[in-house]
Image (cartoon, helix red, strand yellow):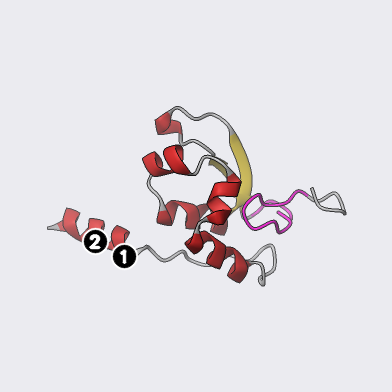
Amino acid sequence: MSATGEELCPLCLRPLGDGSNVDRHHLVPKSEGGRQTVRMHRICHRKIHSLFDERELARNFADMERLRAHPEIRRFVEWVRRRPPEFHARTEPTRTQRQRRRGRRC
């Protein structure tokens, strides 16, 4: 919670606002047995899943401190903190994701 009592996104630490751009993120993905969720901005949630697969999230990034420490997430958080809480933009796929998609189409 912020000093004003607003709920904060656990990744970027901006207020969640009215909840229109809020998702629930499983700290350990459901496919890996996770149940606990946290509310976060949709753009933050999508950024996490654009970088890591579910197994990697479960093994290495099951808490926000570890996620925020990752260099790509750190750069993203620095960028998104300059945006208003309701900001949302399309999350571009990573190079690895683009390669996977091309491989499936072949």
Q: Position of residue 43 (x, y in %)?
A: 55, 59
Q: What secondary structure do most residues of the magenta stretch adopt? A: loop
- Residue that numbered label 2 is attached to: 99
* CB within 8 Å, label 1 to label 2: yes
Q: Secondary structure at mark 1?
A: helix
Q: Amino acid at mark 2?
A: Gln
Question: Is 53 on the left or on the right of 69, as rendered?
Answer: left
Q: Position of residue 23 (x, y in %)?
A: 58, 47
Tell me the residue at 31%/58% (across/down): 97
For the C terminus, give its image quadrant: bottom left
Give the magenta part as a residue range. Answer: 7-20
Q: Which mark is residue 95?
A: 1
Q: Amino acid at mark 1?
A: Arg
Tell me the residue at 30%/60% (across/down): 96
Q: Is any atom of residue 10 visible in this view?
A: yes
As for residue 12 lying within the magenta part, the answer is: yes
Q: Is 19 in front, or is 15?
A: 15
Q: Residue furthest left?
A: 106
Tell me the residue at 55%/43% (across/down): 25
Question: Is 62 on the left or on the right of 19, as rendered?
Answer: left
